[in-house]
Amino acid sequence: MIDGDARARTDAHVRTNRARWNEISDDYQRVNAPQIRRQAFTGDISWGLWAIPESSLDVLGEVAGRDVLEMGCGGGQWSTALVRRGARAVGLDLSERQLLHSRTLAADTGLTFPLVQASAESVPFADESFDIVFADHGAFCFADPARAMPEAARVLRPGGLLAFSHLSPIYEITVRPGRDTPGTRLTRDYFALRLLPEADGLVSANLPYGAWIRLFRDCGLVIEDLLEPRPQAPALDDRGGQQVYDVEAAGGSTRERAEQPEQPERGDEAWARRWPSECIWRLRKPTR
């Protein structure tokens, strides 16, 4: 049994992240509004830092008629898009301000689904409630993996899918103290990855690859895939050498890439073409 002092220490990152997300939510939603609204209004969802289309990655598979839990729904664009595709979605988030943005988006799109304020480390749902549990740089980036992963596995039905993206552990160990971009030197203790105070005031979460794998196994989950998406490499077009993105290298059609939303400019794009900046895990809960 955990005593009060130990529980308070354990939950410190939860309180920090809730307060910080409430502070930064409005700016985050404003900066990312083009992608957020496009996904919600079209249903064309895309993964991660580099907006790689789900249509080319096929992480979630068929969602129509499935009970889906988004762990860390933020502004609600993913769950909205999945409702548009026929899913029965539920959005969970730690921040009440983020959930306010989800409600606003629901009002704008006319697509509603249940929204629940809770920590991913203590999920208020019965065992085996969902066919799919997922997050795109959501709760698994900020919740203690040792507490959040068992909860995700618990609420997943036998045969169900768990899929989530997060920063690569390799990316994490090159970020210098006080910075929020990667470098070319190892600066963090790889084997000490778990809860990491960041320059923006949030506490992020990660683990070494081996620790992730052992945690999945301990939770009764089977790894189906590990994707490491990269930004598209720039290529020369046929109109005088202007730099454009190489559609085919990214695995998407010309139409898909032309319709991608404007992304906030990032300073780590060239870095991420050479080294893994993010991961997408695809896991399955075995059938009995």
Image: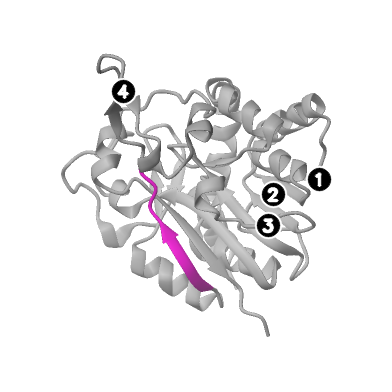
Q: Mark 3 points at which residue?
A: 62
- Label 1 element class: loop
**Rendered view: 132 above or below 205:** below
Q: Is residue 6 visible?
A: yes
Q: Is residue 225 magenta?
A: yes
Q: Is residue 203 magenta?
A: no
- Label 2 element class: loop
Q: Mark 4 points at which residue?
A: 237
Quick one: label 2 or label 3, which is nearer the N terminus? 3
Task: Please tell me which residue is depicted at 30% across the width and 35% down the height of the picture.
Answer: 233
Comparing 235 with 48, the one in front is: 235
As drawn, the residue found furthest toward the top would be: 240
- Tell me residue 155's x, y (percent): 70, 66
Q: Mark 2 points at which residue?
A: 118
Comparing 139 with 70, the one in front is: 70
Task: Please tell me which residue is depicted at 33% across the width and 34% down the height of the picture.
Answer: 180
What amino acid type is highlighted by mark number 4? Asp
In 3D space, how far apart are the residues under numbered discs 1 and 2 (Cα atoms)? 13 Å
Crowding at label 2, few (<14), some or many (≥20) Cα neighbours within 10 Å?
some
**Rendered view: 161 above or below 68:** below
Q: Quadrant of the C terminus?
A: bottom right
- Give the number of the mark in front: 1 or 2: 1
- Label 4 element class: loop
In 3D space, how far apart are the residues under numbered discs 2 and 3 (Cα atoms)? 27 Å
Crowding at label 3, few (<14), some or many (≥20) Cα neighbours within 10 Å?
few
- Tell me residue 183's x, y (percent): 21, 38
**Rendered view: 144 above or below 40:** below
Q: What stretch is highlighted in magenta?
A: 222-230
Comparing 65 with 211, the one in front is: 65
